[in-house]
Image (cartoon, rainbow, N blue to C red):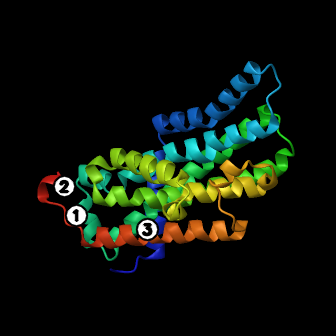
Amino acid sequence: MQMPSLWGAVAVAGFQLRRLLTPPRLAMAALGAVFPAAVMLAASRASRGRLDPDLAVVLLYVLIPEGLCLLGLLVTMCPAVSDELERGTWVHVTVRPSGRASLLLGTFLAAVVWTGSVALIALGIALAVTKVWHPEAVAMAFSGLIVLSCIGRAALFALPAVIMPKRALVASVGVAIVVEYLAGVLPAVVNQATVSLRLRTLLVEWMGWRRKLPVEIQLLVDMQPAWVQVIAVFIVAAVFLTAALFILERRQFPPSEEV
C-alpha cells in the first residue's frame, strides 16, 4: 500500500469542499443547521417553557452529534469512490502516485470539515434558543463531541464507500444501525469498538451525570476516564481508515463500472 501524500489529500479535500459549495448543498446545510433549533423550540413550547435542562442537553445530543453529524457524513463520505466511477475519472485517480489513498483521505477530511462546520453552526443556533445550565460549558463539551463523532463515523463510512461504492449509502445506513446503534447499546465486549459508546460516556462525564445515572443506564457507558474515550475514538477511526485504504488499494473495478 502506497503512503498517501499529505498535500495530495489536502488538495483533494479542497476540491471536494468546492464541490459542496453549490446552491442545493448550501440549502441542505442551512436546513440542517436550523433543524435542531426548530425541534428544541417545539419541545420547549410543548412543555410550556418548562423543559428540563438535562433533558434539553440529551435532546441536543440526539439531534446534533448523533443525528445531524450522521446524516451529513452519509451525504459527504459515502460517494468517495462512486462519484469518480460515475464521472469516468476513476482511471485518472488510479494512475497518479498514491491517487487512491489521497482520494479517500481527502474525502475524509472534507467530510469531517463540512459536516463538523454545519453541526457547530447548528449547535450555536440551538443553544441560542434553548435554556440549559452553563451554556458555555455545554458548548465546549458538544464541540468536542461533534468533532469526535465526525472523525469516528467518517472513518466507519469509508469502509462501505470502498467495498460497495454503488450502494455505499444504503450499506452505510445498515452499518450505522447495526454497528453503532444495536451493537453500541449491548453491554458486551462488542460495543467497545463503537463510536457511540465513547460519545455517550463523554456526554455523561462532561455533564457530571455519573453519580445521577440509574444502575441500568450505567451499563450503557464505559467506566474509564474521558481521555481514554477520546483516544479510543482516534484508535477506532485509524483502524477503519487503514482497513479502507488497504481494501481500496487492492480493489479493481470492471470497465463497466467506470462508465
Residue at the image point whose x is 60% and y is 51% from the top: 116
- Give me the C-alpha separation between circle 2 and circle 3: 24 Å
Q: Nearer the viewer, residue 202 or 216?
A: 216
The residue where tag 2 is placed is 258
Q: Nearer the viewer, residue 1 or 238?
A: 238
Is 118 situated above or below 188? above
Q: Position of residue 56 (x, y in %)?
A: 75, 36
SS state under label 3:
helix
Question: Are dots 1 and 2 in contact, CB under 8 Å?
Answer: yes
Q: Nearer the viewer, residue 94 or 59?
A: 59
Residue at the image point whose x is 46% and y is 71% from the top: 239
Q: Position of residue 147 (x, y in %)?
A: 62, 57
Res 19 seen here: no
Residue at the image point whose x is 60% and y is 45% from the top: 118
Q: Position of residue 126 (x, y in %)?
A: 72, 36
SS state under label 1:
helix
Task: Name the front one of labels 2 and 3.
Answer: 3
Furthest residue toward bottom:
2
Furthest residue toward right:
134
The residue where tag 3 is placed is 241
The three-letter amino acid code for the residue at tag 3 is Leu
Residue at the image point whose x is 69% and y is 58% from the top: 202
Q: Position of residue 193 (x, y in %)?
A: 51, 64
For marks 2 and 3 on the same chain, the one whose residue lies earlier in the sequence: 3
Which quadrant would the N terminus be assigned to in this image? bottom left
The three-letter amino acid code for the residue at tag 1 is Val
Q: Nearer the viewer, residue 259 or 157?
A: 157
The residue where tag 1 is placed is 91
How crowded pointer 1 is (Cα within 10 Å; few <14, some 14-19, many 20+) is rated as some
